[in-house]
Amino acid sequence: MSTVGNSTNIFWQESSIGKTERQQLLNQKGSVVWITGLSGSGKSTLACSLSRELYTRGKLSYILDGDNLRHGLNKDLGFKAEDRVENIRRVGEVAKLFADAGLICIASLISPYRKDRDACREMMQGASFIEVYMNMSLQLCEARDPKGLYKLARAGKIKGFTGIDDPYESPLNCEIELKEKEGECPSPVAMAEEVISYLEDKGFLQNQ
Protein backbone atom coordinates (compact mmCIF):
# COMPACT_ATOMS: atom_id res chain seq x y z
CA MET A 1 0.00 0.00 0.00
CA SER A 2 1.36 3.42 -0.88
CA THR A 3 0.62 7.10 -1.40
CA VAL A 4 1.34 8.62 -4.81
CA GLY A 5 0.66 12.30 -5.33
CA ASN A 6 -2.81 12.97 -3.94
CA SER A 7 -3.82 9.30 -4.08
CA THR A 8 -3.67 7.32 -0.83
CA ASN A 9 -4.11 3.66 0.09
CA ILE A 10 -3.37 2.39 -3.42
CA PHE A 11 -1.76 -0.84 -4.57
CA TRP A 12 0.19 -1.70 -7.72
CA GLN A 13 -1.56 -4.60 -9.49
CA GLU A 14 0.89 -6.99 -11.13
CA SER A 15 -0.06 -9.05 -14.20
CA SER A 16 1.06 -12.49 -15.29
CA ILE A 17 1.67 -11.09 -18.79
CA GLY A 18 4.30 -8.38 -18.81
CA LYS A 19 6.27 -6.24 -21.23
CA THR A 20 8.62 -9.10 -22.08
CA GLU A 21 5.77 -11.32 -23.23
CA ARG A 22 4.13 -8.52 -25.20
CA GLN A 23 7.40 -7.74 -26.98
CA GLN A 24 7.80 -11.40 -27.87
CA LEU A 25 4.30 -11.41 -29.34
CA LEU A 26 5.01 -8.35 -31.48
CA ASN A 27 8.66 -9.19 -32.24
CA GLN A 28 9.76 -5.67 -31.41
CA LYS A 29 10.80 -3.68 -28.37
CA GLY A 30 8.56 -1.07 -26.79
CA SER A 31 10.02 2.41 -27.04
CA VAL A 32 9.20 6.10 -27.28
CA VAL A 33 10.36 8.16 -30.23
CA TRP A 34 9.94 11.73 -28.95
CA ILE A 35 9.98 14.26 -31.82
CA THR A 36 10.59 17.83 -30.67
CA GLY A 37 11.09 21.10 -32.49
CA LEU A 38 9.52 24.39 -33.48
CA SER A 39 6.08 24.63 -35.02
CA GLY A 40 6.46 24.01 -38.74
CA SER A 41 9.70 22.03 -38.37
CA GLY A 42 8.12 18.86 -39.77
CA LYS A 43 7.36 16.92 -36.59
CA SER A 44 3.94 15.62 -37.62
CA THR A 45 5.16 14.97 -41.15
CA LEU A 46 7.99 12.83 -39.80
CA ALA A 47 5.69 11.06 -37.33
CA CYS A 48 3.26 10.02 -40.07
CA SER A 49 6.03 8.97 -42.45
CA LEU A 50 7.79 6.99 -39.72
CA SER A 51 4.58 5.24 -38.72
CA ARG A 52 3.91 4.29 -42.35
CA GLU A 53 7.45 2.98 -42.88
CA LEU A 54 7.25 0.92 -39.69
CA TYR A 55 3.90 -0.47 -40.81
CA THR A 56 5.38 -1.64 -44.11
CA ARG A 57 7.97 -3.53 -42.08
CA GLY A 58 5.30 -5.21 -39.98
CA LYS A 59 6.01 -3.11 -36.88
CA LEU A 60 3.27 -1.69 -34.68
CA SER A 61 3.44 1.97 -33.71
CA TYR A 62 1.08 4.67 -32.48
CA ILE A 63 1.34 8.45 -32.88
CA LEU A 64 0.66 10.84 -30.01
CA ASP A 65 0.25 14.17 -31.78
CA GLY A 66 0.29 17.29 -29.65
CA ASP A 67 -2.64 19.01 -31.38
CA ASN A 68 -4.71 15.83 -31.52
CA LEU A 69 -4.26 15.24 -27.79
CA ARG A 70 -5.57 18.73 -27.07
CA HIS A 71 -8.87 17.61 -28.60
CA GLY A 72 -9.34 15.10 -25.79
CA LEU A 73 -6.83 14.13 -23.10
CA ASN A 74 -5.45 17.65 -22.74
CA LYS A 75 -8.42 19.76 -23.83
CA ASP A 76 -8.57 21.34 -20.36
CA LEU A 77 -5.07 22.81 -20.75
CA GLY A 78 -4.02 26.10 -22.28
CA PHE A 79 -0.56 27.35 -23.19
CA LYS A 80 0.57 28.98 -19.95
CA ALA A 81 3.88 27.67 -18.62
CA GLU A 82 2.24 25.46 -15.99
CA ASP A 83 -0.21 24.07 -18.54
CA ARG A 84 2.62 23.24 -20.93
CA VAL A 85 4.36 21.34 -18.13
CA GLU A 86 1.24 19.32 -17.36
CA ASN A 87 0.61 18.73 -21.07
CA ILE A 88 4.02 17.11 -21.50
CA ARG A 89 3.74 15.16 -18.23
CA ARG A 90 0.47 13.58 -19.33
CA VAL A 91 1.81 12.71 -22.76
CA GLY A 92 4.91 11.21 -21.17
CA GLU A 93 2.81 8.98 -18.95
CA VAL A 94 0.67 7.81 -21.87
CA ALA A 95 3.76 7.23 -24.02
CA LYS A 96 5.21 5.13 -21.21
CA LEU A 97 2.10 2.94 -21.23
CA PHE A 98 2.30 2.42 -24.98
CA ALA A 99 5.96 1.44 -24.70
CA ASP A 100 5.11 -0.94 -21.87
CA ALA A 101 2.50 -2.49 -24.18
CA GLY A 102 5.35 -3.24 -26.59
CA LEU A 103 4.51 -0.57 -29.16
CA ILE A 104 6.80 1.97 -30.75
CA CYS A 105 5.16 5.16 -29.52
CA ILE A 106 5.82 8.23 -31.67
CA ALA A 107 5.23 11.41 -29.68
CA SER A 108 5.15 14.55 -31.81
CA LEU A 109 5.06 17.75 -29.78
CA ILE A 110 6.86 21.09 -29.71
CA SER A 111 7.70 20.30 -26.05
CA PRO A 112 9.77 23.49 -25.73
CA TYR A 113 11.21 23.05 -22.24
CA ARG A 114 14.23 20.81 -21.74
CA LYS A 115 13.37 19.85 -18.19
CA ASP A 116 9.96 18.54 -19.24
CA ARG A 117 11.44 16.36 -21.97
CA ASP A 118 14.08 15.12 -19.54
CA ALA A 119 11.35 14.25 -17.04
CA CYS A 120 9.68 12.09 -19.71
CA ARG A 121 13.00 10.38 -20.39
CA GLU A 122 13.34 9.58 -16.71
CA MET A 123 9.95 7.82 -16.78
CA MET A 124 11.35 5.24 -19.19
CA GLN A 125 13.57 2.30 -18.32
CA GLY A 126 16.95 1.92 -19.97
CA ALA A 127 17.54 3.45 -23.39
CA SER A 128 13.98 3.14 -24.72
CA PHE A 129 13.46 6.92 -24.97
CA ILE A 130 14.72 8.23 -28.30
CA GLU A 131 14.71 12.00 -28.59
CA VAL A 132 14.56 13.28 -32.17
CA TYR A 133 15.38 16.96 -32.56
CA MET A 134 13.99 18.67 -35.65
CA ASN A 135 16.74 21.25 -35.93
CA MET A 136 15.14 23.56 -38.47
CA SER A 137 15.76 27.29 -38.33
CA LEU A 138 13.07 29.71 -37.25
CA GLN A 139 13.33 31.30 -40.69
CA LEU A 140 12.53 28.00 -42.41
CA CYS A 141 9.69 27.15 -40.03
CA GLU A 142 8.17 30.59 -40.39
CA ALA A 143 8.44 30.41 -44.18
CA ARG A 144 6.69 27.01 -44.15
CA ASP A 145 4.06 28.07 -41.58
CA PRO A 146 1.63 25.29 -42.59
CA LYS A 147 -0.99 26.31 -40.04
CA GLY A 148 -0.60 30.08 -40.40
CA LEU A 149 0.35 30.40 -36.73
CA TYR A 150 3.53 32.43 -37.17
CA LYS A 151 1.59 35.04 -39.13
CA LEU A 152 -0.91 35.28 -36.29
CA ALA A 153 1.87 35.45 -33.69
CA ARG A 154 3.68 38.20 -35.58
CA ALA A 155 0.41 40.12 -35.74
CA GLY A 156 0.06 39.83 -31.96
CA LYS A 157 -3.02 37.62 -32.20
CA ILE A 158 -1.29 34.69 -30.47
CA LYS A 159 0.63 35.29 -27.25
CA GLY A 160 3.30 33.01 -25.83
CA PHE A 161 4.08 31.41 -29.20
CA THR A 162 7.21 29.26 -29.14
CA GLY A 163 10.05 30.83 -31.11
CA ILE A 164 8.44 34.26 -31.21
CA ASP A 165 7.72 35.41 -27.66
CA ASP A 166 8.27 32.16 -25.77
CA PRO A 167 11.56 30.22 -25.74
CA TYR A 168 12.44 26.87 -27.25
CA GLU A 169 15.23 25.02 -25.42
CA SER A 170 17.17 22.80 -27.79
CA PRO A 171 18.12 19.29 -26.64
CA LEU A 172 21.64 18.87 -25.34
CA ASN A 173 22.03 15.12 -25.79
CA CYS A 174 19.38 13.91 -28.23
CA GLU A 175 19.75 10.55 -29.92
CA ILE A 176 18.91 11.87 -33.40
CA GLU A 177 19.26 15.36 -34.84
CA LEU A 178 17.66 16.11 -38.20
CA LYS A 179 18.88 19.28 -39.89
CA GLU A 180 17.73 21.33 -42.83
CA LYS A 181 19.74 21.01 -46.02
CA GLU A 182 20.33 24.04 -48.21
CA GLY A 183 17.49 25.86 -46.51
CA GLU A 184 15.02 23.03 -47.00
CA CYS A 185 13.56 20.38 -44.73
CA PRO A 186 14.67 16.86 -45.76
CA SER A 187 12.04 14.66 -47.37
CA PRO A 188 9.69 12.77 -45.02
CA VAL A 189 10.94 9.40 -46.27
CA ALA A 190 14.60 10.36 -45.80
CA MET A 191 13.95 11.51 -42.23
CA ALA A 192 11.93 8.39 -41.42
CA GLU A 193 14.67 6.15 -42.81
CA GLU A 194 17.23 7.82 -40.56
CA VAL A 195 15.08 7.13 -37.50
CA ILE A 196 14.41 3.56 -38.61
CA SER A 197 18.14 2.97 -39.11
CA TYR A 198 18.69 4.03 -35.51
CA LEU A 199 15.92 1.74 -34.27
CA GLU A 200 17.37 -1.16 -36.25
CA ASP A 201 20.91 -0.54 -35.03
CA LYS A 202 19.74 -0.42 -31.41
CA GLY A 203 17.65 -3.60 -31.73
CA PHE A 204 14.19 -2.09 -31.30
CA LEU A 205 12.76 -3.71 -34.43
CA GLN A 206 13.25 -7.24 -33.23
CA ASN A 207 12.91 -8.99 -29.90
CA GLN A 208 16.13 -10.89 -29.18
Image (spheres, rainbow, N blue to C red):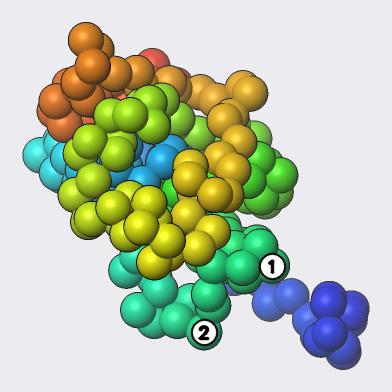
Where 168 falls versus 206 (above or below)? below
- In the picture as drawn, the residue positioned furthest to the left comes out as 56
Can see residue 142?
Answer: yes
Identify the residue under disc 2: 76
33 to 147, vertically: above or below: above
| Disc 1: which residue | 82
Q: In this view, does 11 lie above or below 197?
A: below
Q: Which element is circle 2 on?
A: loop
How far apart in space, not on screen, are marks 1 and 2 (Cα)? Answer: 12 Å
Left or right? Give the position of 141 relative to 171: left
Tell me if residue 103 can be seen.
Answer: no
Whether residue 171 sits left or right of residue 55 in the image: it is right
- Residue neighbourhood size for the residue with mark 2, other residues' Cα within 10 Å, grouped as few (<14), some (14–19), many (≥20): few
- Left or right: 188 with respect to 116? left
Place of residue 106 in the rendered image (x, y in percent of width and height, measured from the top left)? 37, 48
Q: In which quarter of the image is residue 193?
A: top left
